[in-house]
Image (cartoon, rainbow, N blue to C red):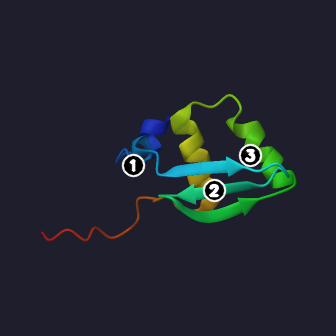
């Protein structure tokens, strides 16, 4: 499955996720500028290994999956019909 099938609404193109690596190898993950998760130890190293060879959109998808802040397509559509 490619990224276009996963992110059908192109939300990850806007790069809502970011991260910061600290000197003590903690990783702070942010969504729209708000801190949502801290990774440390083995989790931190696994994240770094996953993103090492990933492109920007893949990194966004990895962070979305780790944080759980990713739409699965089963949410109700709030648009007036």
Q: Earlier in the sequence, mark 2 or mark 1?
A: 1
What is the CA distance from the residue labelled 2 to the residue labelled 1?
A: 17 Å
Mark 2 residue crowding within 10 angstroms, few (<14) / some (14–19) / many (20+): many
What is the CA distance from the residue labelled 1 to the residue labelled 3?
A: 21 Å
In the picture, the disc for residue 29 is: 2
Residue 61 appears left or right of 40: left
Identity of the residue drawn at 46% across and 45% down:
15
Residue 50 showing in the rendered view = yes
Q: Is 71 rendered above or below residue 54? A: below
**The residue tagged with tag 3: helix, strand or loop?**
helix
The image quadrant where one finds the C terminus is bottom left
Residue located beneath label 1 in the image:
11
What is the CA distance from the residue labelled 3 to the residue labelled 2?
A: 11 Å
**The residue tagged with tag 1: helix, strand or loop?**
loop
Identity of the residue drawn at 28% across and 67% down:
77
Mark 1 residue crowding within 10 angstroms, few (<14) / some (14–19) / many (20+): few
Q: Earlier in the sequence, mark 1 or mark 3?
A: 1
Q: Earlier in the sequence, mark 3 or mark 2?
A: 2
Identity of the residue drawn at 58% across and 62% down:
68
Residue 60 appears left or right of 80: right
Residue located beneath label 3 in the image:
47
Outermost residue toward the front in this view: 23
Q: Is 63 rendered above or below residue 78? A: above
Residue 1 showing in the rendered view = no
Q: Is 4 rendered above or below residue 34? A: above
Image mark count: 3
């Amino acid at each position: 499955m490619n990224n276009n099938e996963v992110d059908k609404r192109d939300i990850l193109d806007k790069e809502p996720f970011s991260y910061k690596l600290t000197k003590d190898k903690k990783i702070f993950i942010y969504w729209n500028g708000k801190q949502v998760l801290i990774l440390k130890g083995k989790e931190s190293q696994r994240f770094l290994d996953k993103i090492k060879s990933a492109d920007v959109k893949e990194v966004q998808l990895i962070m979305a999956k780790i944080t759980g802040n990713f739409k699965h397509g089963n949410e109700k559509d709030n648009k007036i019909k």
